[in-house]
Image (cartoon, grey):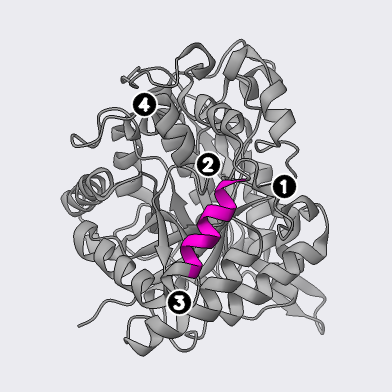
Amino acid sequence: MVREIRLNAFEMCCVGHQSPGLWTHPRDRSSDYHGLRYWTDLARILERGKFDGLFLADVLGVYDVFAASPDAALRAAIQVPVNDPLLVIPAMAQVTEHLGFGVTCNLSYELPYPFARRMSTLDHLTEGRIGWNVVTGYLNSAAKAMGLAQQTAHDERYDVAEEYMEVVYQLWEASWEDDAVARDRARGIFTRPDKVHRVVHRGAHYTLDAIHLCEPSPQRTPVLYQAGSSPKGRAFAARHAECVFLSGPTQKVIAPRVADIRRQAAAGGRDPAEILMFCIMTVIVAPTEAEARAKHAEYRRHVSREGALALLSGWTGVDFSTYALDQRIDYIENDAGRSAMENVSRADPDRAWTVGEIADHVGIGGAGPVVVGSPAQVADALEGWIEATDVDGFNLAYGVAHESFEDFVDLVVPELQRRGRYKRDYRPGTLREKLFGPGRARLAAPHPAQRHRRAP
């Protein structure tokens, strides 16, 4: 059976996202990120292209590792200014019927109780199309903004995340029974008190005694995404994630991580095929290869190398302003994003990056590969990546907003459909049902969230 290619658009409520400097391109719209029209136009484009979802990145803190200052990030708009991604989702849901929304929220600085309410609210407002990308953060500037001297150690952040998941699972799954809400006008009973239960939790990091504030939403627990590729992050994904976002520049970086997550999922009793793997990719496409390469060259003229190094410094926790451009990048372990450092140092034994090379690479689309070509060439490349890495699909970054997504929808989607590799219409139901099939609106065993659900 031919595997259907899955697609998310990769965006952020900021300027340029992962293509430093390309906001200066005359056709780029990303500097309009603060207006709703920007987001509703994008949602319509993606739904026309039958994208599974819009994957919204987010970051707390600023990129101030490069030259020990936020100046480079501010000059080049490196994910600052940045708005709250949750607030644009209802507007996009209003102008679409099927598009899913995977939103990044950092649990390290977010108490479980109010966060669980916000996600339930979004699940209601989108009629079951919300997902949560679970992250633990990587910027010390975020920790300082929250009143801490520095961020918690990398592996300890995942220990905290394990308990956090237990708390929100209980709120979403255990507090309200399915038939708790009666809406009985005749008797004047909206909610049956005997069907609503307190969640009492006393753990190492969180203490809670509360009733969840929201009635059961279509999915209860949102679709769970996870984007950490470190060993600790992969173990977390194998236990909790339904969709995993992997970043890396080559197939030799991505393939072992996919295999490791599937292996750990199977060892934990989960079906490894039930975890959808998305890897980052940027596509620059035109009707002919020559036109696509000309467009790529045009984009490259707008790249900010300083901005790219500021972005990379934030990801890795390494100040690349102190490196010569021809200096080879060696692995350094710290409490920032370990997989980001590994991507450009030791993950691919066939590639030794210099600082200048990785700055040029990051300049369009961030840490992932860039595919340039005609629709047929792009489709060949996507199929080749799936064959070589066992990913299920791609989180597509952009070079120029919204041109990159419009080009993909108009040129690549018809080619993938012609090959039988891409859906011609959406499945009915919630985001989880669209991804995994009918009757799958809510998490089922053996996922750890399911054990908290009360029997009817």
Sequence-wise first label, 4 or 3: 4
- Residue at point 28% right, 34% down? 231
Report, in whole angstroms, how far the alpha carbon at label 3 lies from the one at label 2: 23 Å
Give the residue type at disc 3.
Answer: Val
**Quarter containing the N terminus:** bottom left
- Residue at point 38% right, 25% down? 155
Give the residue type at disc 4.
Answer: Thr
Q: Which disc number belongs to residue 363?
A: 2
- Magenta-tinted stretch: 291-301
Sequence-wise first label, 1 or 3: 1
Report, in whole angstroms, how far the alpha carbon at label 1 lies from the one at label 3: 26 Å
Placement of 441 over or under 33, stated as above or below: below
Give the residue type at disc 2.
Answer: Gly
Determine crowd level at label 2: few under 14, some 14-19, many 20+ residues with C-alpha closer than 10 A.
many
Determine crowd level at label 1: few under 14, some 14-19, many 20+ residues with C-alpha closer than 10 A.
some
* Snapshot quadrant of residue 304: top right
Determine crowd level at label 3: few under 14, some 14-19, many 20+ residues with C-alpha closer than 10 A.
many
Give the residue type at disc 1.
Answer: Thr
Residue denoted by label 3 = 412
